[in-house]
Amino acid sequence: MGSDRRLDPSDRVLLAMTCHRLALACGPPAEKGVEEAGAIKVPARLTAENQRGWYGAMAARAEFGLGCRHTSVELPADEQPTLSSRSLRTVVVLADAGCTAQAARLTEGTDLVARARQALADGDLVTASDAIQAALVSDQSIPQTFWNELPGLLKRYRDAKFPDLYAPSPGGAASADATRAAYYLLA
Protein backbone atom coordinates (compact mmCIF):
# COMPACT_ATOMS: atom_id res chain seq x y z
CA MET A 1 0.00 0.00 0.00
CA GLY A 2 2.80 2.42 0.85
CA SER A 3 4.34 2.04 -2.60
CA ASP A 4 1.10 2.84 -4.46
CA ARG A 5 1.64 6.34 -5.83
CA ARG A 6 -1.99 6.49 -7.01
CA LEU A 7 -3.31 6.45 -3.47
CA ASP A 8 -6.20 8.88 -2.88
CA PRO A 9 -5.03 12.01 -1.00
CA SER A 10 -7.34 11.37 1.96
CA ASP A 11 -5.98 7.82 2.17
CA ARG A 12 -2.41 9.18 2.19
CA VAL A 13 -3.15 11.21 5.34
CA LEU A 14 -4.66 8.15 7.07
CA LEU A 15 -1.74 6.00 5.90
CA ALA A 16 0.72 8.58 7.21
CA MET A 17 -1.05 8.75 10.58
CA THR A 18 -1.11 4.96 10.91
CA CYS A 19 2.53 4.60 9.92
CA HIS A 20 3.57 7.41 12.26
CA ARG A 21 1.71 5.92 15.22
CA LEU A 22 3.11 2.43 14.59
CA ALA A 23 6.61 3.70 13.68
CA LEU A 24 6.49 2.04 10.25
CA ALA A 25 8.39 3.09 7.13
CA CYS A 26 5.60 3.36 4.57
CA GLY A 27 7.30 5.16 1.71
CA PRO A 28 6.62 8.27 -0.37
CA PRO A 29 2.79 8.18 -0.18
CA ALA A 30 2.98 8.37 3.63
CA GLU A 31 5.52 11.20 3.41
CA LYS A 32 3.16 13.01 1.04
CA GLY A 33 0.37 12.36 3.55
CA VAL A 34 2.31 14.22 6.25
CA GLU A 35 2.67 17.20 3.90
CA GLU A 36 -1.03 17.05 3.06
CA ALA A 37 -1.92 16.88 6.76
CA GLY A 38 0.03 20.08 7.34
CA ALA A 39 -1.88 21.78 4.54
CA ILE A 40 -5.34 20.90 5.90
CA LYS A 41 -7.10 24.15 6.74
CA VAL A 42 -8.20 24.40 10.35
CA PRO A 43 -11.50 26.28 10.55
CA ALA A 44 -11.03 29.67 12.17
CA ARG A 45 -13.89 28.96 14.56
CA LEU A 46 -15.28 25.66 15.84
CA THR A 47 -19.00 25.42 15.10
CA ALA A 48 -21.59 22.65 15.13
CA GLU A 49 -21.51 22.67 11.32
CA ASN A 50 -17.73 22.25 10.94
CA GLN A 51 -16.88 20.20 14.02
CA ARG A 52 -16.01 17.02 12.09
CA GLY A 53 -13.56 18.86 9.84
CA TRP A 54 -12.19 20.82 12.79
CA TYR A 55 -11.55 17.67 14.82
CA GLY A 56 -9.94 15.95 11.82
CA ALA A 57 -7.64 18.87 11.06
CA MET A 58 -6.63 19.30 14.69
CA ALA A 59 -6.05 15.55 15.15
CA ALA A 60 -3.82 15.45 12.08
CA ARG A 61 -1.82 18.44 13.35
CA ALA A 62 -1.48 16.78 16.75
CA GLU A 63 -0.39 13.44 15.29
CA PHE A 64 2.54 14.97 13.40
CA GLY A 65 3.43 17.71 15.90
CA LEU A 66 2.54 20.43 13.41
CA GLY A 67 1.61 22.93 16.11
CA CYS A 68 -1.43 24.95 16.99
CA ARG A 69 -3.14 26.84 14.21
CA HIS A 70 -5.16 29.90 15.09
CA THR A 71 -8.66 28.73 15.81
CA SER A 72 -11.32 30.09 18.10
CA VAL A 73 -13.27 27.87 20.45
CA GLU A 74 -15.99 28.99 22.81
CA LEU A 75 -17.80 26.48 24.98
CA PRO A 76 -21.48 26.81 25.86
CA ALA A 77 -21.84 29.24 28.77
CA ASP A 78 -24.38 27.03 30.51
CA GLU A 79 -21.74 24.32 31.07
CA GLN A 80 -19.80 26.18 33.74
CA PRO A 81 -18.69 24.99 36.23
CA THR A 82 -19.10 21.45 34.81
CA LEU A 83 -17.93 20.80 31.26
CA SER A 84 -19.82 18.33 29.07
CA SER A 85 -18.13 15.26 27.61
CA ARG A 86 -18.04 16.98 24.22
CA SER A 87 -16.42 20.11 25.65
CA LEU A 88 -13.82 18.05 27.51
CA ARG A 89 -13.02 16.23 24.23
CA THR A 90 -12.56 19.63 22.56
CA VAL A 91 -10.17 20.75 25.30
CA VAL A 92 -8.11 17.55 24.93
CA VAL A 93 -7.94 17.92 21.13
CA LEU A 94 -6.75 21.51 21.53
CA ALA A 95 -4.10 20.44 24.03
CA ASP A 96 -2.93 17.54 21.86
CA ALA A 97 -2.47 19.96 18.96
CA GLY A 98 -0.37 22.29 21.12
CA CYS A 99 -3.05 24.89 21.89
CA THR A 100 -2.45 24.53 25.61
CA ALA A 101 -3.15 28.16 26.58
CA GLN A 102 -6.56 28.07 24.92
CA ALA A 103 -7.30 24.64 26.42
CA ALA A 104 -6.41 25.92 29.90
CA ARG A 105 -8.54 29.05 29.40
CA LEU A 106 -11.58 26.90 28.55
CA THR A 107 -11.26 24.96 31.81
CA GLU A 108 -10.97 27.96 34.15
CA GLY A 109 -13.34 27.64 37.08
CA THR A 110 -13.96 23.92 36.54
CA ASP A 111 -12.91 21.35 39.13
CA LEU A 112 -11.72 18.76 36.64
CA VAL A 113 -10.83 16.14 39.25
CA ALA A 114 -14.38 16.34 40.59
CA ARG A 115 -15.62 16.07 36.99
CA ALA A 116 -13.50 12.92 36.50
CA ARG A 117 -14.84 11.40 39.73
CA GLN A 118 -18.41 12.18 38.65
CA ALA A 119 -17.84 10.64 35.21
CA LEU A 120 -16.48 7.45 36.80
CA ALA A 121 -19.45 7.32 39.18
CA ASP A 122 -21.80 7.84 36.22
CA GLY A 123 -20.15 5.02 34.26
CA ASP A 124 -18.23 7.09 31.68
CA LEU A 125 -14.55 6.11 31.57
CA VAL A 126 -13.60 8.10 28.47
CA THR A 127 -14.98 11.36 29.88
CA ALA A 128 -13.12 10.73 33.15
CA SER A 129 -9.87 10.33 31.23
CA ASP A 130 -10.55 13.51 29.21
CA ALA A 131 -11.20 15.41 32.46
CA ILE A 132 -7.85 14.32 33.90
CA GLN A 133 -6.03 15.13 30.66
CA ALA A 134 -7.63 18.58 30.75
CA ALA A 135 -6.61 18.99 34.41
CA LEU A 136 -3.00 18.17 33.58
CA VAL A 137 -2.93 20.59 30.65
CA SER A 138 -4.39 23.39 32.75
CA ASP A 139 -1.99 22.71 35.62
CA GLN A 140 -4.76 21.86 38.07
CA SER A 141 -3.53 20.00 41.11
CA ILE A 142 -4.59 16.37 41.24
CA PRO A 143 -4.55 15.05 44.80
CA GLN A 144 -2.51 11.94 45.51
CA THR A 145 -5.64 10.37 47.00
CA PHE A 146 -7.23 10.39 43.52
CA TRP A 147 -4.24 8.53 42.04
CA ASN A 148 -4.29 6.07 44.96
CA GLU A 149 -8.02 5.36 44.52
CA LEU A 150 -7.89 5.13 40.73
CA PRO A 151 -7.06 1.41 40.30
CA GLY A 152 -10.05 0.54 42.48
CA LEU A 153 -12.31 2.97 40.64
CA LEU A 154 -11.38 1.37 37.30
CA LYS A 155 -11.97 -2.27 38.35
CA ARG A 156 -15.61 -2.24 37.34
CA TYR A 157 -14.63 -1.11 33.82
CA ARG A 158 -12.44 -4.16 33.15
CA ASP A 159 -13.67 -6.55 30.47
CA ALA A 160 -14.75 -9.81 32.15
CA LYS A 161 -13.16 -12.01 29.45
CA PHE A 162 -10.07 -9.90 28.80
CA PRO A 163 -9.02 -8.20 32.06
CA ASP A 164 -6.25 -6.16 30.40
CA LEU A 165 -8.92 -4.37 28.35
CA TYR A 166 -11.47 -1.82 29.50
CA ALA A 167 -15.05 -1.00 28.56
CA PRO A 168 -16.46 2.52 28.23
CA SER A 169 -19.04 1.71 30.90
CA PRO A 170 -19.17 -0.96 33.63
CA GLY A 171 -20.20 -4.38 32.36
CA GLY A 172 -19.82 -3.41 28.71
CA ALA A 173 -17.59 -4.82 26.00
CA ALA A 174 -14.02 -3.58 25.80
CA SER A 175 -13.18 -0.88 23.29
CA ALA A 176 -9.97 0.66 22.01
CA ASP A 177 -11.00 4.14 23.20
CA ALA A 178 -11.87 2.96 26.70
CA THR A 179 -8.69 0.87 27.01
CA ARG A 180 -6.59 3.86 25.89
CA ALA A 181 -8.45 6.06 28.39
CA ALA A 182 -7.87 3.61 31.26
CA TYR A 183 -4.18 3.19 30.54
CA TYR A 184 -3.77 6.94 30.23
CA LEU A 185 -5.22 7.30 33.71
CA LEU A 186 -3.09 4.49 35.10
CA ALA A 187 0.17 5.70 33.55
Image (cartoon, grey):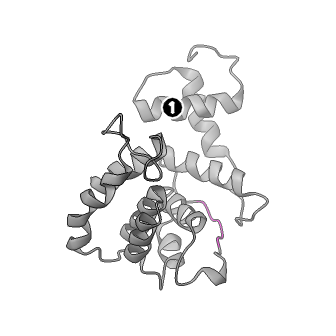
Between residue 35 and residue 132, name the one nearer to us.
132
Q: Mark 1 is on which residue type?
A: Thr
Q: Is residue 70 magenta?
A: yes
- Is residue 64 in view from this perspective? no
* Quadrant of res 148: bottom left
Q: Main secondary structure of the magenta part?
A: loop
Residue 181 visible from this viewpoint = yes
Front residue of this view, candidates 176 and 33: 176
What percent of the width, then of the height, locates residue 12? 63, 28
Does the magenta-highlighted stretch encompass residue 95? no
Residue at disc 1, secondary structure: helix
Horizontal side, residue 173 vs residue 165: left or right: right
Residue 172 higher or lower than 107, as above or below? above
Closer to us: 28 or 117: 117
For image coordinates 79% across by 59% down, the residue present is 49
**Res 15 → quadrant:** top right
What residue is shown at x 60% (from left), y 64% (from top)? 86
Q: State the residue position of label 1.
A: 18
**Residue 91 at x, y percent in the picture:** 53, 66
Residue 149 picture location, percent across and down: 24, 65
Numbered range of the magenta stretch: 69-73
